[in-house]
Image (spheres, rainbow, N blue to C red):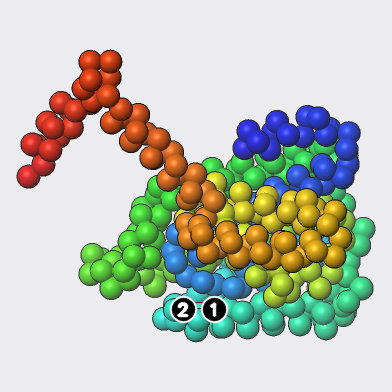
Amino acid sequence: MAFAVILPQPYAHDFYYLDLFTLCCLYGILVLGLNIIFGYTGQLALSHVGFWGIGAYVSALLTVDLGWWSGWAMALGMVVCAALAAPLGIITRNLAGHYLALATLVFTGIVQLLLLNWVGLTKGPNGIGGIPPLGVGGFVAESPLARYYLMLAALIVVAVFTWRWQTSCYGRRAAAMKRSELAARSLGVDTSQLKVVSLMVSAAIASFAGSLYAHYLGYVSPDVFGFAEMFKMVTMIIIGGLATVGGPIVGAALLVMAPEWFRGFQQYWQLIYAVLLLVLVLRMPYGIWGLVLRLRDNLRHRRRDAPSVTGKAPHAPERAEEEVKVP
């Protein structure tokens, strides 16, 4: 978070970098929502981009055609996506692995086809333009800096929510189910209900990100909400680190910024980008954030075990006492 707050100061008047930072925040929100169902619960649901598109179009239609305030349109989009996620979760609650991935991917395909072919409502391939920017009262986030800070504030809210979710009873039950669904059931965890609730929460966050996207760009079209974006989100969360709050944000920032860093290599940048992603996936199974946490733990252990000036480990007596107390 501090990284995102400090960095824009030298670029406060550079619209290009401000837009990149804003996209980092937007994808961070999107991937944090995917982390609820994929990271914490262990369910590879590929319907996330479909809910993202529904949220974007609900906000676009309500604000452009009906003149709603963007906040109400955003809230209704979240309710609609959560309501659609409930039957999808009930239908797919007994599926796992690639069967669940394929079933939820079909939902994404259906959403994209509806957005493309329901011309009377969605304007088809032409998309919907003229979407007003976000605003509260007399304040309207029209400048790039205002849009960036608004998106950053939304990212902080979602990050705090996911952290609370991780430490809540739902998060602990999800962690137990992710390790062993059979063991979690034997302990009294209603795994079917947990899957449905997790998918509903994940879909609501995806809708929230979709509404932010629509009001940020002022234009939506069906080609954005396709399979390529879904795989991009999955890559972000795997590279950043599953089941963590910082990992999805780091992964989103890396995959948004990396193409810009390597663009100077012209025809070779895509190859470099692909090799870098392959190395990260193979060499860091817990993601970049997992590597950071592991380095932090190793550093703590070294400091703890380092001998003092008397030649004794500073915490050796306490550790010995702890070992005696363990039954």
From where the camera sits, is residue 25 visible? yes
Q: Is residue 10 above or below residue 128?
A: above
Tell me the SS state at disc 2.
helix
Residue 101 is tagged as 1
Q: Nearer the viewer, residue 154 or 324?
A: 324
Residue at the farthest front position: 311
Q: Position of residue 2 (x, y in %)?
A: 63, 33
Q: Position of residue 68 (x, y in %)?
A: 81, 55
Give the quarter of the image for residue 202. bottom right
Q: Are marks 1 and 2 in contact (CB under 8 Å)?
A: yes
Asked if residue 26 lies left or right of residue 199, the reply is: right
Tell me the SS state at disc 1.
helix
Quadrant of the frame with the C terminus: top left
Residue 207 is tagged as none
10 Å crowding of disc 2: few (<14), some (14-19), many (20+): few
Q: Nearer the viewer, residue 2 or 161?
A: 2
Quadrant of the frame with the N terminus: top right
Give the quarter of the image for residue 193. bottom left
Q: Residue at x 45, y 81 (%)?
A: 95
Mark 2 lies on residue: 97
* Type of the residue with mark 1: Ala
Q: Nearer the viewer, residue 125 or 59?
A: 125
Q: Is residue 160 above or below residue 238?
A: above
Q: Is residue 105 above or below residue 321?
A: below
From where the camera sits, is residue 32 visible? no
* Type of the residue with mark 2: Gly
10 Å crowding of disc 1: few (<14), some (14-19), many (20+): some
